[in-house]
Image (spheres, helix red, strand yellow):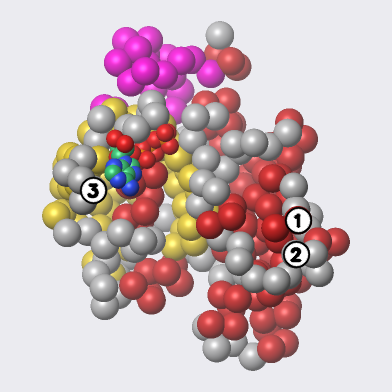
């Protein structure tokens, strides 16, 4: 597999109403990097992430995941490689029980039942959610739903984890647990977030988006030390740096 595990070149995207959300983005992310995507509301973060696991297939520009250019044909390969945790866990949980939700992906891969069961148990244990196994997802709290949504992705053993606003609506303890969990995930992580303190803690590299463009891409510490850049990107220094 290519060591440029994610490669985006001149990616452009407009929603059907003509709203241009991505105006020509290019970057490469290597295996094992932990990269934050930050920027004001409407900067294009979620739209970019949707292109990384093929929820949106590039029409202008290219996305490469490892050895595969992302096209309709390579979608199954890309989805096996990239695990996407959506902004709203309700978009990810739809089965009658937590167990069924976490088992859904591995079952679809055609894995034998024992292997599916082992993956479900391991993924739920990783997020501290074994006790939720038989519960209906719609009855869980926001933080519990988030943990289970992450388990549904971990059970697929992805090489790349893409998370959209993973700490939103989490209480401080749940947020800390999630950050610890993500520290333990050694593969590539790409995280869109407004939680700049989490970025300081977790991501060595930060990409700043502004109105569909990349405003800056570099070491997180350098980005957050640049007041002019923060101002231009409508961002504020993380609390831990004030
Ligand atoms: N379904 C849609 N139809 C039309 N325009 C959309 C749609 N979804 C998003 N947009 C627009 O695309 C642009 C980028 O939105 P996007 O959700 O990617 O931003 P974001 O950086 O993730 O924002 P936030 O921080 O608020 O989640 C915005 O101008 C937004 O209004």
Instruction: Give the residue number, with chain letter if any, for mark 2.
Output: 136
The answer to whether the residue labelled 1 contacts the one labelled 3, judged by CB atoms less than 8 Å apart, is no
Question: Where is mark 3, residue-wise?
Answer: 15
| Residue 139: mark | 1
The answer as to whether callout 3 falls within 8 Å of ligand 1 is: yes
Residue at 61% over, 62% down: 93
Q: Residues within 10 Å of mark 2 (few under 14, many from 20)?
A: some
Q: Residue at x 28, y 70 (%)?
A: 68
Please say if 61 is above or below 20: below
Task: For the N terminus, give its image quadrant.
Answer: bottom left
Quarter placement of the C terminus:
top right
Residue 31, x across and y down, in percent? 42, 55
- Which mark sits nearer the N-terminus, 1 or 3? 3
Marks 1/2 in contact by CB < 8 Å: the verdict is yes
Q: x, y (%) of residue 48?
A: 32, 47
- Magenta residue span: 215-238
Could you tell me which secondary element the residue under label 2 belongs to? Answer: loop
Label 2 near ligand 1 (CB < 8 Å): no
């Amino acid at each position: 597999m290519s060591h440029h595990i994610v490669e985006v070149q001149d990616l452009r995207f407009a929603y059907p109403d003509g709203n241009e959300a991505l105006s020509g983005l290019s970057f490469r992310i290597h295996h094992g990097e932990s990269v934050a995507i930050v920027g004001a509301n409407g900067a294009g973060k979620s739209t970019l992430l949707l292109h990384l696991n093929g929820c949106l297939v590039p029409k202008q520009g290219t996305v490469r995941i490892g050895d595969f250019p992302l096209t309709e044909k390579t979608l199954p390969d890309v989805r096996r490689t990239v695990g996407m945790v959506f902004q709203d866990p309700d978009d990810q949980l739809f089965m009658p029980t937590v167990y069924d939700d976490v088992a859904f992906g591995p079952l679809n891969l055609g894995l034998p039942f024992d292997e599916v069961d082992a993956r479900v148990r391991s993924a739920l244990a990783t997020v501290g959610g074994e006790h939720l196994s038989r519960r209906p997802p719609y009855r869980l709290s926001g933080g519990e739903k988030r943990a289970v949504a992450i388990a549904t992705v971990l059970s697929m053993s992805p090489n790349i984890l893409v998370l959209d606003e993973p700490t939103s609506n989490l209480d401080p303890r749940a947020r800390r647990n999630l950050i610890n969990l993500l520290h333990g995930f050694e593969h590539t992580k790409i995280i869109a977030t407004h939680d700049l303190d989490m970025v300081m803690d977790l991501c060595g590299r930060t990409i700043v988006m502004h109105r569909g463009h990349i405003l800056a891409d570099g070491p997180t510490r350098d980005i957050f030390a640049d007041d002019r850049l923060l101002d231009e990107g409508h961002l504020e220094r993380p609390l831990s740096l004030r």
